[in-house]
Image (spheres, coloured by chain):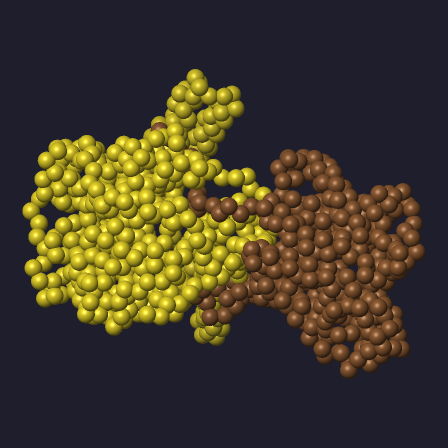
Amino acid sequence: MAFKQITSPHAHSAQSTGKVMQLVIWATVPGLLALTYHFGWGSLINVLLATATALIAEAAAISLRGRSVSFYLRDYSAALTAVLLGLSLPPLAPWWIVVVGTLFSIVIAKHLYGGLGYNPFNPAMVGYVVLLISFPIQMTSWITPLALLPDGLSHPGIIESLNIVFAGYSPADGVTGATPLDSFKFSDGLLVDQIYAQNPLFSEAAIAGVGWEWVNIGFLIGGLILLGSRIFTWHGPFAMLATLTLMSVIFWDGGSSDSPGSALMHLFSGASMMGAFFILTDPVSSAVSNRGRLVYGALIGVLVYIIRAWGNYPDAVAFAVLLANFAAPFIDNYTLPRTYGHTDRRRATEKEED
Amino acid sequence: MKTWVTPGGVHPPENKQQSLTLPIGNLPLPDKLVIPLSQHIGAPAVPCVEVGKKVLKGQKIAEAAGSVSVPLHAPTSGTITAIEHRPIAHSSGMLAPCIEITSDGRDKWQKYEGFEDYENATPAALVKAISEAGIAGMGGAGFPSAVKLNPGFHHPIDTLIINATECEPYITADDSVIRERAAEIVTGIGILSHMLGRPHNILIGIEDNKPEAIAALEPHVAESGISVVSFPTKYPSGGEKQLIYILTGKELPSNQIPADIGMLCINIGTTYAIKRAIVNGEPLISRVTTMTGEACGINRNYETLIGTPVSHLLTHSDFDQDACSRLIMGGPMMGFSLTDTDVPVVKTTNCILAPSHQEIPDNQPVQPCIRCGLCAEACPASLLPQQLYWYSQAQDHDRLEAHNLFDCIECGACSYVCPSNIPLVQHYRHSKGQINKARADKVKSDQARQRFEFHQQRIERAEKEKEQKRAARRNAAEKAQTKTAASGSAADIIAAAQARAAAKKVSPEQQQAKLERSIAGAEMRVQMAKEKLAEADVNQTDEQKNALIAAVETAKQKLEQAKARLAEHVKQHDLADNGEKVD
C-alpha cells in the first residue's frame, strides 16, 4: 500500500486568489451604480469594454509566455485591473482611449514585468497616467451630473452612448462639464464661501459635490465590505484618508481665496474613496507589513493633497499611488514587525554579524 | 484567570467530535511490533537484546545512549525476531534501525514496582526513574522528559505549564485521556511539582473547546494549587512559545528555552505517563492515539502499544483505502504524510488521520504570490511570510535572517490561508536547511583558514628563529676569527682543519661495502620491474606497458651506474682481490 508524500499543512482554507479578485470586483458595484445613476451609461461601457480588451490581451500575453491560458485567466486579476481602469476613465470617452489604456495596463505594466505578482506599479494607474499625459483633452472632459443637467436634457441612452463611444458622435451641449475638483481649482480669486454659493456643483450638494459625493460613498461602502471580509487591513486606507483630512484641516486657511478646500470636499470628491479602498490596497505594488502600509497610505494621502492643492492636476490619486509604489520596497526595509521573542524590530537590510 | 491573546492564528474546522463519541478503546494484540530505536530527540537507543531472545512485557530492550536519550521496553511479551532497518514514520520516507518483537500472545508483564511514597523520594531518584521508564515528550517533539526535569540542569522553575491545548484539528488523544484519567494526571502533575521544588504557579493550559476535559480536571485540582486556565480556541495556541505568552503574557526570547525564564512546559499526556512510571512502575510502552478521518468507519481513541503497525489500527477501524486521499501521522496542520502503512506507532504518535478526498483534497496548483498579506495576518510569530517566500526563492540568506526566518515555528498557518496555494512552510524548511548548511560550511572554512594562518605564522616564526641563530653564529664566528687573528698562529688552524678532515674521511672498505649494497638494491629493483612487466602483459594498455618497459630500462641503467662506480672505487683503492667478483 502506498500513499502520496505531501508536506504539511494538509488542510487548506477555502480562500483562493480568484475568489479574492472576484469579491473585489463585486465590491465596486455600489460605486459603479452611483456612477451610472449620476453620469449615465458611460462608465458601464468603459468597464465592459476594458474588461473585454483586458481578457484578450491577458490571454495573448499568457500564451506568448507559454503558460496555461485557462488556468491564469481564472485568477480574475486582468478583469479586476480592467474594471478599476474603466471606473476611473471619463464616461463616454472614445473607445480607443479605453483600449489603449487597458492594453498598456495589461501588456506593459503587468506582463512585461513578469505578470501577476511581479508588477512594481499598479497596472490600472499606469494605464490611467499614460492616458492622462497623452490625451489630456479626452481625459478631462467629464459628464455633468444628472441633477445639474439643463432642463429638458438627459444623459444619452444606451444606443446613443454606444454611438458616442464607438462612432465618434458628439454628446449634446451641456452634457459635459467640469468636476468639483476642477471647478474648485480654477475658481481663482473667489472665497470658498463664494464658490460654494455660486457653483451649483457645490450649492446643490449635500457634503462635497453633486453626484461625486454619492460615487465616493458608493466606493466607501464597497471598501467597507472588503474590509469586513478581511480582504485587506484597515491600515492603508485609514492612513491615506486620515492624512488627507489632516492636510486639508492644516491648510484650510479659513476659506480664503487661496484655500485648497475643505476636508469634506477632499474626502468625497474625485477618486479619494476609490483610491483609498480599491487602488492603494492593491497588495502587489504596496508595502507589505501593516506598519509599512500605514506609512504607504500616509504618503499617498500627503501626495494627493499636495498635487491637488499646489500641482497642475485637479486630481492626483494615480500620480500619488505610482510615486508611493516607487517608495514601497524602501518602506518595506524599515517597517518589519517585531517578531515574537525579539525585543526590537529589525531592518530588512541588516546583515548577520560574522 | 487572565490570559493574553497571541497575534495571528487561524480557525480551521476542528473535527474533534467524530473521535470522541466512544471512550478510549483497546486493540487486539498485533502479531508483530516494530520498535524504532529513535523515537525521541537525541541519540538513538542501543539494543540490549539479541535476535531470538524471549522478553517479557515491560522488559528493557534498548538502553539510552548518553544523557539525551531514552531506553526502550518491550510493549508485549514475545521473542525478538529482528533487529534491522525498517520503514518508519519520517517525512523523508527513510528506513531506520528497529527491533521487531513477535508476540507470544500471553502479554505477560515482567515484575515491576513503583515508588510507594514519591514525596519522600529525592528528585534525582525520580528523574532516574522517569529516564529509565523511557519517557519522552508525547505532544510531538519527543524530547526526553528526564532531561527537562533534571533539577541541577537549569535555572529554578517558578512556573510549570501543563500543555493540554491540543490545538490541532482532529486530534483528541489528550482530551480523551483527561476525560478518563484526570485523577492520575493530577497525581502526575503533583510528582512534577515535587521534583521541581513546588513552583509558585502550576497552570494547565487548555482551549475552551474541551469543556468536558475541563470539568473532569476541576474536582481533582481543587485546593492543589493547580489552576486550569482555559482560553479561546485558535490554532496554534498549543505551540510552546504561544502557550507561554497566552498564560503568562511573557515571550520566550528568541534562541532561549523556557527554563531560561524559569518556566517548564510539559504535555499533559506525558504527565500521565510520568504518573504511571513513578507510582505504578510501568515503563512507557503504550499511548493513546486518535484514529480518525472519513476514510475510516470507526473514529475513536485507542490505547495503542508502541510499535503497533499503522495498518493494524486501520484494519480495526474499518479503513477504506480507495476513499483515503492521504495518510497522515499527526494532525492536518503539522502532521507528516505516510507512504507506507507498515510503519509503527511511536511515543509521539498522537493521531493517525485518514481523510477522504472531500475532507482533504489533493493540493491545488500553485498560483503567483500577490502579497495579499493573509499569511502575515495568520502568522503567530509576527513574521512576514510573503517576504520570506520571496527571499527564499531568491536564496537571499541575509534578508531571510533579517526577517527572522529562524523564529518560524512551521505551524503552517500561512500555507493554510494562502489563496494562491503556495506551500510556504516547505520553502522555509528548505531555506533553513540551506542556511544551516551554509553556516556549517562557514565554520569549516573558517577553521581551515585559521589552520592555514597558524601554519604560515609557524613557518615564519621558525624562519625568523633560524635567521636569528644564523646571525648569532655569524657574530660568534666573526668574533672568534678576530680573536684568533689577534692571538693564534696560522699553522695551528691548518692542523686543526686537517685533523677534522681526517676524522670525516671514510675508510675505503666501508665505501666499497656501501657501493656493493647499492648494487644489490639496484638489481632487486630491476628484478621487480621485470616481474611487473610480466604480470602486466594481459590486461594493460600499451601506454601502461611502455611505462613499465621504461621503468625496467631505468632500473638497468642505475644498476650499470652503480657497477661502474664500484669498479672505479676498486681501481682507485686497489682492492679488487678483496671485493666480490663483478660481472
User: Which chain is drawn using yellow?
Assistant: B
Image quarter of the N terminus of chain B: bottom left
Which residue is painted at 27% across and 32% down in the image?
A: B315
Residue B510 horizontal side relative to residue B494, left or right: left
Which residue is painted at 67% across and 68% down in the image?
A: A241
Residue A281 horizontal side relative to residue B353, left or right: right
Q: Residue furthest front?
A: A152
Q: Residue B287: x and y, percent? A: 23, 47
Task: Answer above or below: position of B92 versus B405.
Answer: above
Q: From this viewpoint, is residue B94 visible?
A: no
| Camera-nearest residue between A133 and A223 | A223
Task: Answer above or below: position of B335 versus B257.
Answer: above
Q: From this viewpoint, is residue A344 visible?
A: yes
| Camera-nearest residue between B576 and B34 | B34
Residue B579 horizontal side relative to residue B181, left or right: right
Q: Residue furthest top?
A: B538
Residue B516 horizontal side relative to residue A153, left or right: left
Q: Colour of chain A?
A: brown
Q: Residue B56: x and y, percent? A: 11, 40
